Image: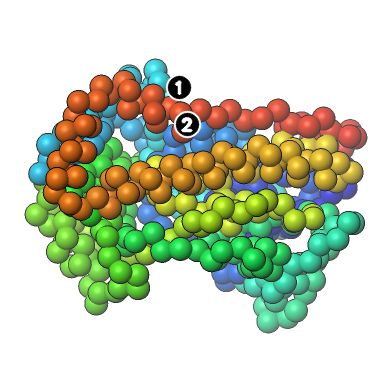
Amino acid sequence: MDGHAVVVGGGIGGLAGALALHRSGWRVTVLERAPELRELGAGLTLMSNALRGLDALGVGPAIRAHGRVDGPGGLRTRTGRWLSRVEAAGMTGQLGTTMLGIHRADLHGILRDALPPGTLRTDAEVLDVTTGPDGARVRHRRHSEPTTLAADLVVGADGLRSTVRSRLWPDAAAPVYAGATAWRAAIGWTDPLPTAVSWGPAAEFGMVPLGGGRVYWYGAVTAPAGGRAPDELAAAREHFGDWHDPVPALLAATAPEQVLRHDLYHLATPLPSYVHGRVVLLGDAAHAMTPYLGQGAAQAIEDAVTLGAACAGGPAHLDTALDRYDRERRPRTQALARASARAGRYGQQLRHPVAVAFRDTLIRLTPSAMALRQAARYADWHPPLPEPATDRSARPW
């Protein structure tokens, strides 16, 4: 096989896509616009679908070594009353595994280190992408010098405001504000904590134990877009400082410089295809979704594994491979994006006291096994089999 793929974007989805293609025998170049390749952010949870995908990429054991398997958890009100509780044994029975909490930087670093030396090119700002029947070209500026790369395949993994999408999907609707802003931090914390989400009127607070004696917390509130505070930690305390324990203690253990704040955006209008010629979209560039189901990173990993499997036959069969990728990934990711938006409307964004009371009562009366079956539906994914390699130089999946 003599295929060359250029991946635009060095985030979790881009690195996972590069690793999947590399393991399928492709020569890969990753272009990242940042001067240094590093993942900003705090923590995330990986459900069984994401862990299966990472196992397929050969990094599952390293991920588990750096993360922390979640124990009991559930859903609470802002006063601490449990609405729904989930035990680890029940989660394992329904999902095939418990969830795992990990810092984004750890996941990012493991994927980066699994790639061959020389794969990554930082300080590379992509200016344009073109595609034709024989391949694609990526024009970019690196170290202030204009450069063009030819490739058999270009993967747009450059996030919510994707340059690749804007160039080749010019009619695609712009990202839409989801109506909420969120504060996040990963801090040192050694006391036992459940993985739990708490709801208040138009607000949500979550906590996830991470590996290495850390915990990730986030708080989201309904608010106009673009709001900022001189002290974001003080703003978070204003909203969540009187919530149940240990929320005030988590905020008290946080330094102001540890707090990140981001408005939540998503692609509310689905794309008609994730493929344009020899260019394919992956992760947030294709289907940026709200975070309410905790599936954003998982879907990018699924995309990456599916793309690598589809392209294992090499560039000679690329049209068929990309058609397979689009058919397998677009329905699932767009359905999950819709479900996540609905989850936000009935969860964090719900404000009216009568509606909140009705929702909370309904959740309390719902057996935990039924709630687990709903979560299992989102995590019910297994890596696809690769297309047969067309020559002996292709690596086994």
Query: Between tags 2 and 1, which lies in front?
Result: 2
Which of the two labelled residues, at mark 2 and mark 1, occupies the earlier sequence position? Answer: 1
- Kind of residue at disc 2: Ala
Residue on which the image places disc 2:
379
Decide: is 84 above or below 118.
above
Residue on which the image places disc 1:
96
Specify few, some or many for label 2: CA neighbours under 10 Å numbering under 14, 14-19, or 20 or more: many
Q: Position of residue 259 (x, y in %)?
A: 30, 63
Q: Position of residue 83 (x, y in %)?
A: 18, 33
Near-viewer residue (76 or 45): 76
Near-viewer residue (345 or 208): 345
**Residue displayed at 40% across by 35% down:** 100
**Residue displayed at 80% across by 71% down:** 148
Specify few, some or many for label 1: CA neighbours under 10 Å numbering under 14, 14-19, or 20 or more: some
Indicate the quadrant where residue 158 lies. bottom right
Query: Quick one: SS at disc 1?
Result: loop
Q: Position of residue 19 (x, y in %)?
A: 66, 45
Indicate left or right for 289 with 344 as reference.
Answer: right
Residue 112 seen in the current view: no
Indicate left or right for 372 with 110 as reference.
Answer: left
Q: Do residues under tags 2 and 1 come within 8 Å of each other at their CB atoms? A: yes
